[in-house]
Amino acid sequence: MRLSRSSARQIDALVRLLDRIGRKKETASVGVPRFRTRYSELPQDDRPYFFDAILRQMEVAKPDIEDALAEVLESDAEDPIAWSRHLTQLRRRLESPRLRAFRYFLSTSGGLPFLLDLRADVLTAHRNSELDLGPLDEEIAHLFTSWFQAGFLFLQELTEDSSFRQIRFLKEHDMVHPMASLEEMGSRLGEDRRLFALYHRTMPEEPVVFIEAALTQGLVGSIQKILGAERPPPKSVRDTAIFYSINNTQLGLEGLGLGKALIFQVVELIRKDHPEVKVFSTLSPIPGFWEHYLLRILRGDDATFAMKRARLPEFFPRRRQLELLEAHRACTGQTATDFHTALIEILSSEEWIDEPRYTSLLEKPLTSLSYFYITKEENRRGKPLNPVAAFHLGNGARVSRANVNFAANPSPRGLRESCGMMVNYVYSDTWLQQLGRTMQSLLKW
């Protein structure tokens, strides 16, 4: 894509303004609001080129660090004071002009929310364009890592008595189990429900991440038992806390680990208020299992996966394939040409979950395939391919095949994303104790 002259001029003016802010040639109180206004006027398609421009034009020049680098290389490392002095000087020289400019945003009203939105744009552009914007993303993430330390964050529980504005905000930002109306918040609050949100002190009205928990008797493997009509009686024994929805409300905070900090604080509060609770687990979706994984394998597009189309008979033996073909014919009146086509047609329809002939034949293979997906499929970095599994298993949770739940979310979205499957990731006492020690040391810092 080639930029128009007007877009190129817009980008050039934005780069020069940001540079002036970083060099203090324009005060932050004046320059930052002007920058925010001009950036908002830049078309979405042109923003990746602006990010590329500041990477190229607002960078440390080689001559600017040569003297400081030479002093470090020539310094006597056995003299700790001189060594530290030279390293400090080099670090100061290595900070890019754009990073210095972004630091001034925090001192202005609305500066932090703007930078959160800016990083969200950077992440989107990095994923969807051919430009390598990784260094810019890392710089902004570095700022957020320091700005979102414990001293800047505070936890608040939301209840039925919380403000309408807060409840509406959470309703609008629950992406795991979206709500059609505010009335549905009634199933998220109450005696056996807890809802906690983490706020930044410069944004006290908008939580940056929030988590919803249900206090239950034993592990719960169906979202209907938490949010639907199957909810247990209020006086039942509660020995387990199920985290069933965790939402990051700011895309710009992706990857900074705030969810881990939130889980720790919430666990501590629940333990204090409900000492009878001994087990902490999640009831998590498996996003991408159907459309981006099993459907592709059934179509033969399996080159990037450990699971192959040729291995499916391990999960669907010949007899089960024939039974599914017969059930498909009986339910649709049509004869599929082969098993793979029939299974695609069955699982692409949301009605299959209400047909006992399908569910009895699909429960075992879908459970096994889901478990394979979350425990065996890895990305290029050797992490679980499924992002939810990567988060929880990376945080120390454990999972077994018995924790994979069939027909756990029969909603249209649950069927489209994961064939209705959900998972309990269980956090062990050992992990919780280790996390507690780590987080307490951070809080003291």
Image (cartoon, grey):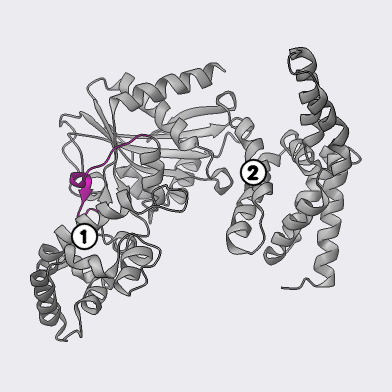
Neighbourhood count class around disc 2 (C-alpha, 10 Å): few under 14, some 14–19, many 20 upward: few
| Residue toward you, 45 or 59 | 59
- The spot of residue 221 in percent (x, y) is 21, 46
- The spot of residue 426 in percent (x, y) is 27, 36
Which amino acid, mark 1? Leu
Relative to 121, say whether 201 is above or below. above
Q: Is residue 403 visible?
A: yes
Residue that sits furthest to the right in the current view:
25
Relative to 95, say whether 423 is above or below. below
Q: Taken as a whole, is the magenta stretch helix, strand or loop? A: loop
355 sits to left or right of 159: left
Q: What's the distance in space between the residues labelled 2 and 1, CA to CA? A: 39 Å
- The spot of residue 76 in percent (x, y) is 78, 18
Q: In the rendered image, which quarter contains the C terminus?
A: top right
Snapshot quadrant of residue 428: top left
Which residue: 34% across, 49% down?
Answer: 184
**Numbered range of the magenta stretch:** 396-408
Q: Which mark is residue 91?
A: none
Which amino acid, mark 2? Glu
| Residue toward you, 56 or 314 | 314
25 sits to left or right of 207: right
Q: In the rendered image, which quarter contains the N terminus?
A: bottom right
Is 398 in the magenta? yes
Neighbourhood count class around disc 1 (C-alpha, 10 Å): few under 14, some 14–19, many 20 upward: many
User: Which residue, given by chain and number where applicable, does mark 2 sit on?
Assistant: 138
Which residue: 64% across, 48% down?
Answer: 119
49 sits to left or right of 267: right
User: Which residue, given by chain and number where applicable, does mark 1 sit on?
Assistant: 366
